[in-house]
Amino acid sequence: MATVSAPAASTLHPRAAAFTVEARSIERRFGLLFGISGIALVAAMGVLGLIMRLTQAKVISLSPAWFYRLLTLHGGGMITGALLAAMGATWYVVHPTVPLRPQRMLASYALLVSGAVAVLVATLIGGFGAAWTFLPPLPFFPSGQWPVWSEAVFFVGMIAIGSGFFVYCLDVLEQAAAAYGGVLAALGWEFLRGREQVAPPPQVIAATVVAIDGMLAMAAGSAITLGLLGHTYDSSVGFDPLVAKNLVYFFGHTIANLIIYLAAASVYVILPRYAGRAYEVTKVFVGGWLAALVFIVSVYSHHLYLDFVQPRWAEIISEVSSYASLIPVAVITIYSMTMLVWGSRYRWTLASSLLYVGLIGWAIGGTGAVIDSIIPFNFRLHNTVWVVAHIHTYLMLTVVVWILAFVAHMLERDAGRTSSSGARIAMLTLMLVGGFGLTGTWFVEGALGIPRRYAIQPTGTSAYSVVGSIFGLLFALGFLVCLLQLLSLARTAWERRHYVQVEHVESWTGTHYKAREERELTPEAPRDLPNAIGTPLSGGPQLGFGLGLCIVSLAAFFPQVISASESSIRYHHLDHAGQFLFGTALGVLLGSAPSISRRLGDRPGLGVAAVVVVPIVMMLLMVPRIYEPLERHPLEHGLYHAGMAALGLLTGLGASRLGVVAGRLSAFLSIGMALMFAAAMKGG
Amino acid sequence: MTGGQFFWTLQPARVPAGSRVRFDVTSIDVNHGFGLYDPHGHLIGSVQAMPGYHNQLDLTLDEPGVYLIRCFEFCGLSHSTMMSSLLVRRR
Ligand code: HEM
Ligand SMILES: [Cu+2]
């Protein structure tokens, strides 16, 4: 009896073999875990979206209290779901070149999922409904609709989501810097300046940009959210509404913005596999991404100051530039991808058609943004449902489509086949008509000046909501058709993973027949993870700088400074932040000293835990109701200050285990969090 | 012009047509958004109402009629019914 294994069918472009790596099982597993969890969350939240639109259409009646609970959950859940899937996609394409750590990815998953659960509990059980952007002080003005505990649970959820993304970003930054010899090299800067001949792959550049901006925004988010959490425990914690607003928006807008960049990172790798041409990184590409790196952050930092008395023009400038910041990357991506597909005999499968449609969605959404930013009376659209139209064009018609494409890509590769073209066409038609129809109704309503977040829309406009609901249903139907195709691909993939089709030849009669045989799974060879290279400070001048910082920040312990700071809560907090700064600087300095560093050894896991958890503890200790009882006695007060320094020391030692770039950035951010926390506080 | 959950108070509530009006906008509790529609229902201006801060919006109101005011920043349960109006009198 002779046995012939059937050749593996490929769904990719025939030329793709030259540059496509075989996915390892660790990549597939994480990709599927994040992709499927994300899609499941998006699907569930979509139902809530429909319920809200039908309520606005007055087809179903839902009390405003429930409308706002669902709005809060829909917004927070969609962002978390889309983020999860996009993180998985990027991990899947970055891991083959940059060995990201599975433990970190699991920790990140656990944090994000528990955050989503907390938001679910706070809204559905607790009744919290201050919107996922929780603009302070709204969470504390519940109009009798939600108890204090639901506020606390919601904030804990947001902190968990932010910390989960922070851990992910930290790992990407640390490992990319280690793999490419520094963060500037990983960003393509050395290539741009002509110091290096070969650029890092596109997904690495994109992921590094996202990682840096993600860490900054998550640190700001943690600082303000911890302050708000403190308020639920001690209502004497006051905050400046303007600073709080900027920190909250910096967190919320950035996390929402970064999702599309993160998803794009995976498209640079996956789409070329269907065009049969590898993606070439050009200097324009690197320049565009570096511009995005700076834009994303600078947009909000100038917002922070100009917002002060809120002149109209300042707000318009920042709004225009926040749209404009998306443009370089969008144009570069859309143009280069179109060129890649052009004349390539693009291979149409479920995944590749979704990738293509997402690109079109981005082009259309981007054009809308450009039109929007050149309209002089742009303010007329501010906070109208026009903004909702924007959000959904980006998230629904690009990000969601791409994350479906990502999961389809994995399943198709495993299944060795794609879905039927009829199902694909039905799906795309429904999603495009439904999606653009739904956003279209918002665009029109926005132009008419209808405000967003209205449970009850102005009289005479419910027809738009009716039409919008119908289009929304069509979109949902298309989404469902996609899920069915994914399910069927998953079944084939499952069978192929466990059984092989083998062709047998009957030795007597000579006839061929096929049979399934159990597949022998080949164990995977573990890969060595390179550990973070170097320490945050090295060499005389740098260690000297660390020492200098320690000495200067010792000032925070001088009795004169302490008593002067007691004039207000804000200054006293700044003093505590100074003590934390001292500890952190000392920790980084000690951890960087070669002899101590050797003795501490490689402890990346503990390092991350320290830089994430310890600053949170530090900020919680700054809640007056917790520290005030301690401050009555000079001894206890002294111990409290020593405790601040000790927490800093732990953070600093932790940061010193994370390598040069990630170590420096996380130490810097933990100090930044203490300062932001202090700055946002008011009272005394 | 002061916003609160869920009402607007304005002083004065009527002005003569053609006058240049400065809206000095603030809030006594959460963030609100002051949005003004002309008598035809077109949005003609909006500004943030933030507790502890005063924001100014200058508009010339030529046309007599009732100018509707709506809230443009989500402020809680009755955000969508938080309305008021300004009467512009014929000179
Ligand atoms: C069938 C699909 C969907 C429908 C019918 C829908 C419906 C809605 C509705 C009615 C609102 C409130 C609009 C308002 O302010 O008046 C909303 C807000 C929002 N939606 Fe969706 N949505 C859908 C899909 C999505 C998707 C796929 C995402 C993201 C991945 C998303 C993210 C958001 C966000 C972030 C908000 C803003 C929440 C807020 O204002 O606090 N939606 N959606
Ligand atoms: Cu309001």
Image: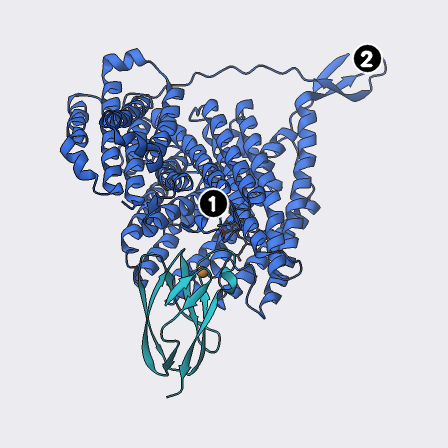
Which picture quadrant has residue A201? top left
Distance between the alpha carbons at the discs numbered 2 and 1: 52 Å
The chain drawn in cyan is B
Host chain of mark 1 = A
Q: Nearer the viewer, mark 2 or mark 1?
A: 1
Q: Type of residue at label 1?
A: Met
Q: Which residue is mark 2?
A: A507
Residue A354 position in % (x across, y down): 58, 44
Which picture quadrant has residue A213? top left
Residue A479 position in % (x across, y down): 63, 46
Q: Which residue is mark 1?
A: A337
Host chain of mark 2 = A
Up/down of A504 relative to A75, above or below: above
Q: Toward the viewer: A164 or A95?
A: A164
Q: Quadrant of ligand 2?
A: bottom left
Q: Type of residue at label 2?
A: Ser
Which picture quadrant has residue A297? top left
Q: Quadrant of the N terminus of chain A?
A: top right
The chain drawn in blue is A
Q: Viewed as shown, does residue A113 lie left or right of A248?
A: right
- Residue visible at 34% across and 60% down in the picture: A316
